[in-house]
Amino acid sequence: MKYQYQLSLSPEEAANQFKLKKAASRYGKIALRDINYVEILKRSIDARQRKVKINLKVDVYVKEDFTEKKILLPDYQDVRNKEEVVIIGAGPAGLFAALRCIELGFKPIILERGKDVKTRRRDLKALNIEHIVDEDSNYCFGEGGAGTYSDGKLYTRSKKRGDVERILKLLVGFGATPEIMIDAHPHIGTNKLPAIIARIRELIIACGGEVLFETRLTDILVLNNEIKEIRTLKGDRIKAKKIILATGHSARDIFELLYRKKIKIEAKAFALGVRVEHPQELIDKIQYKCDSRGEFLPPSPYSLVKQIGGRGMYSFCMCPGGIIAPCATAPGEVVTNGWSPSKRDQPTANSGIVVELKLSDFKNIEKNPLAAMEFQKQIEQKAWLEGGRTQKVPAQRLSDFTQGKVSENLPVTSYKPGITSTDLAKVFPGFIHKTLQTGFKEFNKSMRGFLTNDAVVHAPESRTSSPVRIPRNPYTFEHVQIKGLYPCGEGAGYAGGIISAAIDGERCAEKCIESFKNS
Ligand SMILES: Cc1cc2nc3c(=O)[nH]c(=O)nc-3n(C[C@H](O)[C@H](O)[C@H](O)COP(=O)(O)OP(=O)(O)OC[C@H]3O[C@@H](n4cnc5c(N)ncnc54)[C@H](O)[C@@H]3O)c2cc1C
């Protein structure tokens, strides 16, 4: 027999099968000797009370054997001689579009401006140590996309549980830990993601798909509002009637290309601010209300949101036990974001703290669909100047920042290229700076001790979502003006994060293939 229970246990009980059995026996009034196994189906941490609890949904196997359910990949077909779908970009959207194409019997051809996931690492090293920004190979560009060297947080606001579970299962099939199916806030970790991405590529190629690295799309030829051909920086001319455009939120040259070609795009509001770093120990103390979190609790995340003067200000992409990364995609700009290894075992916690922007914040918005992107770019360039014209970022201690004081000195941070003490008022327009100053004080009311000079503010966190939308028909997913163009993923404005980009990739592939069948 199998019974399903909701249990609320101490972290230690939740981590031990024998203690789990005892808890289930108590809860269900079942003899302990009759319980063969307690399987955890869902797990979340409840840190609202004085004592932290782990909430579990479990299946209890009573006088019945438990057999582990292996998650298998779908039956991918050989597609080498099948109809081709060209996909631009090998981020989560592009890769999952390719996998779906194969499942549905179509041959994906991926064009990716960056390098394979392993070779890409060398360019990240050069970025961190020598401050060299390769415009095709960096934290945003290259196999796996922007999410590859990330925390690999896999939660999403998507309400479509079915779609989310499908993506999680695929990730497990490609080598992610099955724990991601259980945790309320699953994450993979920077050290684990590259191998998963490489396995996805190997499968695509084994099935007859193609993945072309160092192949940057530079032109799209359109005749009578229909895609005819695409061109690459290397000079390839590829006949293509249908393309899935999944180039991410940092492909500014693609937005500029579409604008030049008079292909309809729209400015999109996004959020912008700073990345703040605290000692992880301090965050644990505040969140878990204890002196030390002990061995059974993970480094604590936090999530903060406030309305400040009519604008939302919130934590974004919080990385417990993580590192701040240099995420510029062109020389002359600095950008921050964060990542964590799977164990989240670094001594610092970082998070984007961003302010909601509105379309009315951008100059010439009525006439210029690139206005939000230009606003974003200007702040990144100002930060580059203030940081010292390298990949060093301008920074301030947190309390100093809220008081408008330049910090006399700065502690060591996880941001490898280095930081420069500056008044961040020089980087941000007044309304963003003031909102951040006020907001941090408000945050301190929710998390006492958060506002401290032991924390450091790094500027800017600017690539939170795409500053441009590439509009598409909500039913066919085809561009509203250009036949055969399928805007996809975060860059097109239809996703925000690894999971939602992967979901959008799958759906774009389905819609694109449907259109083949209808034509
Ligand atoms: C450091 C960092 C940490 C992050 N952490 C998380 C996290 O923990 N969880 C989460 O959900 N999200 C995270 N994100 C965000 C997440 O990575 C993105 O939401 C997601 O990758 C978007 O997927 P995408 O496929 O739409 O675009 P992208 O991942 O941006 O992929 C676009 C791809 O297109 C390629 N490309 C661009 N232009 C061209 C061109 N002209 N020709 C050919 N190829 C081109 C790029 O090289 C890139 O590989 C993080 C991002 C960064 C930078």
Image: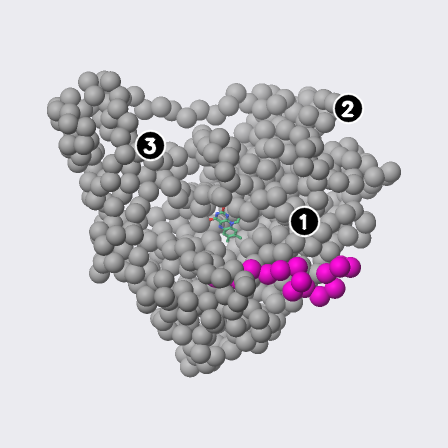
Q: Which residue is mark 1?
A: 469
Report the residue at 58% width, 74% height from top.
430
Magenta region: which residues? 353-368
Res 109 visible: no
Tag 3, which secondary structure? strand
Report the residue at 56% width, 41% height from top.
501
Give the farthest residue toward the right.
224
Give the farthest residue toward the front.
310
- 169 versus 158 height, above or below: above
- Which kind of residue does numbered mark 1 sit on? Arg
Mark toward the start of the polypeptide (2 vs 3): 3
**Is 225 positioned to the left or the right of 295 in the image?**
right
**Is 23 positioned to the left or the right of 474 in the image?**
left
User: Is residue 360 magenta-colored?
Assistant: yes
User: Is residue 451 magenta-colored?
Assistant: no
Tag 1, which secondary structure? strand
Where is residue 375? Give x, y as percent: 66, 64
Who is closer to the viewer here, 347 or 355?
355
Assign the N terminus to one quadrant of the image: top left
Q: Is mark 2 within 8 Å of ligand 1?
A: no
- Which kind of residue does numbered mark 2 sit on? Ser
Who is closer to the viewer here, 44 or 512?
44
- Which kind of residue does numbered mark 3 sit on? Leu
Tag 2, which secondary structure? loop
Mark toward the start of the polypeptide (3 vs 1): 3
Mark toward the start of the polypeptide (2 vs 1): 1
Q: Which residue is mark 3?
A: 41
Report the residue at 71% width, 66% height from top.
363
Q: Which residue is mark 2?
A: 519
Assign the C terminus to one quadrant of the image: top right
